Amino acid sequence: MAERTPERQSLRHESDSFESRSSLRSTHESDPLLDLDAQEHAQTDGSERQSLRHESDSQTTRDAVFQIRDLSFCYADEPVLENISFDIARGKITALMGANGSGKSTLFKLMTKNLRQPAGSHILLEDRELSTYRLSELARKVAVVWQHNTAPYDITVRQLVAFGRVPHKQHFQALTAKDEAAIDEAIEFCELSEVADRRMRELSGGQQQRVWIAMGLAQQTPVMFLDEPTTFLDVRYQVTILRLIRRLNRELGLTVVLILHDINQSFELCDELIALRTDGTLVQGSPQALASEEFLREIYQTDLRVGHIGDQVVVRAPL
């Protein structure tokens, strides 16, 4: 392993950044720690990245990093998504929301290439069909933090975060000073420096979730997907994770796409909402535009009340 250098790269994202193995395959499908290039024999590009920040000064606020067109999907004969089309805005936080069974997880897996894209549909990442990306190549564009993750029993925080550098490496290539700097900065940004040498099994659930996010951050991608990042956490750690996600977006410029079940968290955190109806269609808009009882009844098939505390939308269920 190369010696560390005091000169560290900034944790800022450019549009041609990278991603880790854990991001593209959920744990029930394959080992998240496998080397992508070992599977595909793909070569990493040699271009230099000076910063992790996604620079969007030349982009409009509605510039789309993902474009989905005419997407339908079914399991056997059971339709899940029905001819949906939408964009994911660059540099924004977008939540996929909807009732159980509405297709959130299916859409999430299609956009991260964990399900095969149906013929006749189009999923474009940076104006290019997602189906044309090799996994190793996609892993340098999109990081994914899954809801369920497993790690080797004795692995330390730093060792796990280091797997975020896999998409940048040749077969058996040692970590460079640049890799070490990216790992250090991801750990620091996620406030894990004090536990960097501890084993994952010694950490709380909230700390472990931050480690998986740090691993994705070490990949240096401009886009991060998160699958229900606050599920199973108590309120304290939910707030910690949500604040971290907001910092990823505001301070580093990441485009964030996530699944959230908590409606109030979606309205508080996100710039855009993509709400899936139970008939396989969707509604897209800002939290302010969609903050209506009629909309929520349509999406969740139950009566909810919408109120406001200052400018903040608050949703509650009448009991």
Image (cartoon, rainbow, N blue to C red):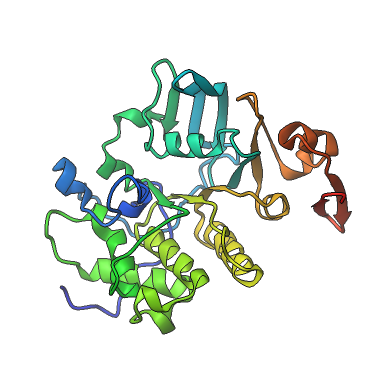
Q: Could you tell whether 240 is left or right of 166 in the image?
A: right
Does 288 appear above or below 116?
Answer: below
In-front residue for pair 299/78: 78
What's the residue at 59%, 35% (across, down)? Answer: 101
Q: Quadrant of the N terminus?
A: bottom left
Q: Could you tell whether 104 is left or right of 195 in the image?
A: right
Q: Could you tell whether 205 is left or right of 15 in the image?
A: right
Q: How many marks?
A: 0
Residue 213 quadrant: bottom left
Q: Can residue 20 be seen in this snapshot? A: no
- Where residue 281 appears, x then y in whole percent? 63, 24
Does 149 appear above or below 120?
Answer: below
Outermost residue to the top: 120
- Where residue 246 appears, x then y in whole percent? 59, 60
Q: Can residue 300 be seen in this snapshot? A: yes
- Where residue 104 appears, x then y in whole percent? 55, 38
What's the residue at 40%, 58% (across, down)? Answer: 149
What's the residue at 39%, 26% (across, down)? Answer: 117
Does 193 appear above or below 162?
Answer: below
- Where residue 171 appears, x then y in whole percent? 12, 54
Residue 83 quadrant: top right
Residue 157 quadrant: bottom left
In-front residue for pair 58/270: 270
